Amino acid sequence: MRIVVTEFITLDGVIEDPGGGEGSPYGGWAFQFDQGEDGGKFKLEETLGADALLLGRITYEGFAAAWPTIEDEAGFADKMNGMPKYIVSSTLENPEWNNSQVLEGDVGDALTALKEQEGGDLLVAGSGQVARELLRRDLVDELRLMVFPVVLGGGKRLFDDGVTARLELVESRPVGNDGIVVLVYRPKAEAAAA
């Protein structure tokens, strides 16, 4: 499978709580901006094109609490609820959301084994800890960043100590009317060969 990490991210690299969940110190920063039809279309196509989700426990719990109750004409909710979901967690035991399973054993081995399976895109949405681990292990095939024009000055960041990557920009485009930019990167060929 091809591992695709997709993130809502601020200019200062924060990915924490873009939707502003209960008790959020950042107030749902991503939804204070107009993503426009093209931003919504990008996220819809990305989800409909994925074969499975790979999530950390916190993102999984947030998604599992929301998606089963959502309905939409575009098929976004049906896809989210129906596709296989793999969860990286040492504390979650019995995931109840449809087609969900917790990865067992060594995390690195489990992630490598998932990548080696047949199939299309394995989409990592949010799940910062998982995304960072995938980046550390050079398992990411594509990194999709929807960059929002805001600086928070704090919060969990996508890139932290120990995460290094040499990437090649393969797509960039503005979406909406508020200065949001979609950036798509792939590992640089020389870095992947080294």
Image: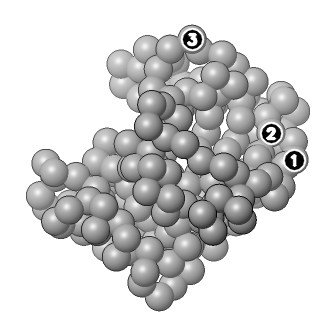
* Number of numbered discs: 3
Vertical side of 51 occupied by 109: above or below: above
**Does 83 sit left or right of 192 as displayed?**
left
- For the C terminus, which image quadrant? bottom right
Choose top left, top right, bottom left or bottom right for residue 189: bottom right
- The one nearer the camera, 53 or 67, is 53
Tell me which amino acid carries mark 3. Answer: Gly
**Looking at the image, do the residues carrying marks 2 and 3 touch, with CB atoms under 8 Å apart?**
no
Q: How crowded is mark 1: few (under 14 residues within 10 Å), some or many (20 or more)?
A: few
Dot 2 corresponds to which residue? Answer: 181
- The one nearer the camera, 49 or 121, is 121
Dot 3 corresponds to which residue? Answer: 153
Q: What element carries label 1?
A: strand
Place of residue 147 in the rendered image (x, y in percent of width and height, measured from the top left): 71, 35
Q: Residue at x 66, y 49 (%)?
A: 166
**Does 47 sit left or right of 34 as displayed?**
left
**Does 191 sit left or right of 69 as displayed?**
right
Q: Distance between the residues labelled 1 and 3?
A: 25 Å
Q: What element carries label 3?
A: loop
Q: How crowded is mark 2: few (under 14 residues within 10 Å), some or many (20 or more)?
A: some
Place of residue 17 in the rendered image (x, y in percent of width and height, measured from the top left): 47, 30
**Looking at the image, do the residues carrying marks 1 and 3 touch, with CB atoms under 8 Å apart?**
no
